[in-house]
Image: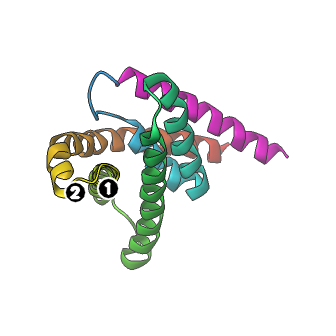
Amino acid sequence: MKKSLNRLTRLALLTALCIVLREAFSGLPNVQPITAIFLVVTTTYGLLDGISLSSLTMLLTGFLLGFGEVVFRQMLAFALICILWFWLNDFIKKLLFGLSLSLQIWLAAGLSLLYGVLLDTSSAFIYATPAWAYILAGLSFDLIHAASTALFYPIIYSIFRRFTHEKNSH
């Protein structure tokens, strides 16, 4: 009971943090620390927590930033990114006996870029437009998202690592 209450409390606090950060950075298109948080949470607390956090964040910020069908596509795209991240982390750890921080940063940036491509492609599908047109039009935003994730990832990673290390040492 206590474990599930702790997990629920952690998820609620992280969701609130992500909502505040998404709102705070909303004036800077695609500069978001939340993608890095989703990935670090997926690594630290598991796939279900990462998907839950990303889905709750997208759903609840939809009410603040504008709610439409795109919110559900964002939820699905982030769920896929969390699944790929979880799988890649596991695969590379087994293959290389560890995952360096620099490789994690590159993977996080690459998956952030993939997130944008997934949204662009789904938009093209919905509006019956060639996917390449949407992908090219959104490429600068997607590259900014990838760069900001690469920038925020080591910061978020070190905060979570310090927090979980202190918690485990008590």
Spot occupied by residue 125 in the image (x, y as percentages of width and height) = 32, 56
Quarter that holds the C terminus: top right
- 12 falls in the magenta region: yes
- 128 falls in the magenta region: no
- Single out the residue that lies furthest toward the front: 128
Q: Answer with left or right where residue 25 lies relative to residue 89.
A: left
Kind of residue at badge 1: Phe
Magenta span: predominant SS is helix
* Residue drawn at point x = 43 percent, y = 25 percent: 65
Kind of residue at badge 2: Ala
Q: Looking at the image, which is closer to me, 101 or 126?
A: 126
* Residue drawn at point x = 42 percent, y = 23 percent: 23
Sequence-first tag of 1 and 2: 1
Q: Which mark is residue 38?
A: none
Q: Which mark is residue 131?
A: 2
Label 1 to label 2: alpha-carbon separation:
7 Å
Name above or below for residue 32 compared with residue 96: above
Which residue corresponds to mark 1?
125
The number of numbered badges drawn on the structure is: 2
Q: Answer with left or right where residue 165 lies relative to residue 38.
A: right
Residue 80, quarter of picture: bottom left
Q: Looking at the image, which is closer to me, 7 or 71?
A: 71
* Residue drawn at point x = 56 percent, y = 58 percent: 47
Residue 28, quarter of picture: top left
Q: Answer with left or right where residue 10 lies relative to residue 159.
A: right
- Single out the residue that lies furthest toward the bottom: 95
Q: Which residues are magenta?
A: 1-25
Numbered disc 2: secondary structure: helix
Label pair 1/2, CB-CB below 8 angstroms: yes
Colouring scheme applied when the structure was drawn: rainbow
